[in-house]
Image (cartoon, rainbow, N blue to C red):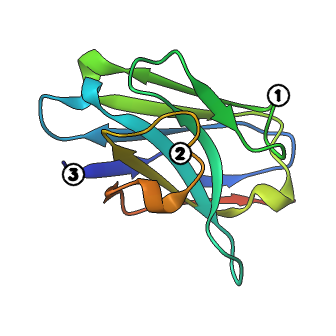
């Protein structure tokens, strides 16, 4: 499977963005999905995840209540709605999928075999 992330850009603090990640292939529904981010000079970190059935979600504490992950299997797309953005949200955001994602594994980047190319989000005044 190949992933194409988009939707990044520059936004003022307090603003919103919606990231999209489109997957190739016809078996997207079998995959659990994760969003990760990497800020300059920092390690890649988990942001949000969704199990393949959509019933299980997880969020980093730093984004809980501000970000929402969702999926549309008919469009082979997963979304990350980001509201109330802060300067510390500035990073390159990556989507990833794997067919073995469960709640206990979704926060680990090593759980995912397939990654998108990343999209840059800059939050600055």
Residue depicted at x 65% and y 33%? 58
Q: Nearer the viewer, residue 110 or 5?
A: 110
Quarter of the figure that contains the C terminus: bottom right
Task: Say few, some or many: other residues with alpha carbon within 10 Å of mark 2 (under 14 / 14 to 19 / 20 or more).
Answer: some
Residues at marks 2 and 1, CA–CA distance in whole angstroms: 21 Å
Whether residue 120 is visible here, answered yes or no, is yes
> On screen, 20 above or below 39?
above
Image position, residue 18 (x, y; %): 57, 35
Q: Which residue is mark 1?
A: 65
Task: Say few, some or many: other residues with alpha carbon within 10 Å of mark 3 (under 14 / 14 to 19 / 20 or more).
Answer: some
Image position, residue 118 (x, y; %): 45, 61
Describe the element under mark 2 as helix, strand or loop. loop
Q: Which residue is mark 3?
A: 2
Q: Nearer the viewer, residue 24 or 122?
A: 24
> On screen, 112 above or below 30?
below
Residue depicted at x 43% and y 48%? 6
Task: Say few, some or many: other residues with alpha carbon within 10 Å of mark 1 (under 14 / 14 to 19 / 20 or more).
Answer: few
Whether residue 8 is visible here, answered yes or no, is no
Pointer 2 or 1: first along the chain? 1
Residue depicted at x 83% and y 43%? 61
Q: Which residue is mark 2?
A: 105
- Which of labels 3 and 2 is toward the front? 2
* In this picture, residue 59 sits left or right of residue 8: right
Pointer 1 or 3: first along the chain? 3
The circle drawn on residue 15 is none
Q: Nearer the viewer, residue 106 or 89?
A: 106
Describe the element under mark 1 as helix, strand or loop. loop
Give the image quarter of residue 121: bottom right
Image position, residue 56 (x, y; %): 56, 22
């Amino acid at each position: 499977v190949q992933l194409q992330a988009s939707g990044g850009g520059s936004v003022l603090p307090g603003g919103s963005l919606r990231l999209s990640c489109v997957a190739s292939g016809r078996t997207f529904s079998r995959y659990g999905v994760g969003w990760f981010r990497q800020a300059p000079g920092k390690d890649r970190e988990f942001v949000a995840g969704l199990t393949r059935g959509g019933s299980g979600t997880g969020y980093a504490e730093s984004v809980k209540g501000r970000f929402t992950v969702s999926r549309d299997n008919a469009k082979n797309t997963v979304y990350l709605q980001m509201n109330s953005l802060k300067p510390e949200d500035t990073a390159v955001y990556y989507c990833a999928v794997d067919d073995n994602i469960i709640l206990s594994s979704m926060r680990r980047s090593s759980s995912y075999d397939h990654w998108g190319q990343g999209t840059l989000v800059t939050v600055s005044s």
